[in-house]
Image: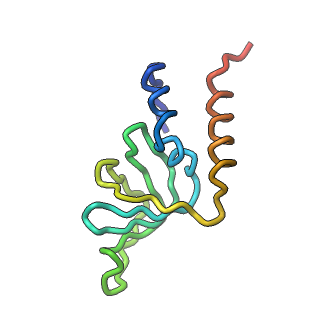
Amino acid sequence: MVTLRHSKLRQKRLENTLVCFVQALVNSRVVIELRNDIVVKGRLRNVDDQMNCRVENGNWTKNYQDGFRHKFDYLHVPGRQIVYVHIPDKVDVSKTLDDHFVKKNQRKKPSS
């Protein structure tokens, strides 16, 4: 997987938005509602600074219409289509954010 390096200004902007919380949910099973009434359920694998999400091993359905679900291995969800990201019940919001920022700060420090 490719990771992108961001400018300091862009990184600071990321830390001041809720995108950082969605990024902290990576590797969790999530439910994402889209603008076109599609509901996506699956494991969140990647979130970029525009909130484009990569979801794997899940399914999507048209607003729970007639119960038919389309399964997928990988799905790219454009950030501009996302209306709502459901937070899993087991997630402690403050602990998740703290852990996320600790991990990000550890990556930034150069190794000696």
For residue 111, above or below residue 29 = above
> In the displayed structure, does residue 50 sit left or right of residue 86?
left
- Closest to the observer: 50 or 55? 50
Q: Determine the residue located farthest toward the left in the rendered image.
A: 36
Q: Please give the name of the residue rendered at 63% of the width and 35% of the height, measured from the top-left corner.
A: 101
- Find residue 103 and report its image quarter: top right
Q: Determine the residue located farthest toward the right in the rendered image.
A: 112
Q: Please give the name of the residue rendered at 43% of the width and 25% of the height, measured from the top-left corner.
A: 10
Q: Please give the name of the residue rendered at 64% of the width and 27% of the height, measured from the top-left corner.
A: 107
Query: Measured from the top left, where is residue 25 in percent x and y?
Result: 56, 51
> In the displayed structure, does residue 48 sit left or right of residue 100?
left
Number of marks drawn: 0
For residue 6, above or below residue 19 = above
- Find residue 98 and report its image quarter: top right
Q: Determine the residue located farthest toward the bottom in the rendered image.
A: 66
Query: Measured from the top left, where is residue 13 in percent x and y?
Result: 44, 29
> In the displayed structure, does residue 36 sit left or right of residue 96?
left
Query: Measured from the top left, where is residue 90 in percent x and y?
Result: 66, 64
For the C terminus, the quadrant is top right
- Asked which colour scheme the image uses, the reply is rainbow
For residue 99, above or below residue 42 = above
Q: Please give the name of the residue rendered at 47% of the width and 24% of the height, measured from the top-left corner.
A: 5
Query: Measured from the top left, where is residue 35 in percent x and y?
Result: 27, 61
- Closest to the observer: 65 or 72? 65
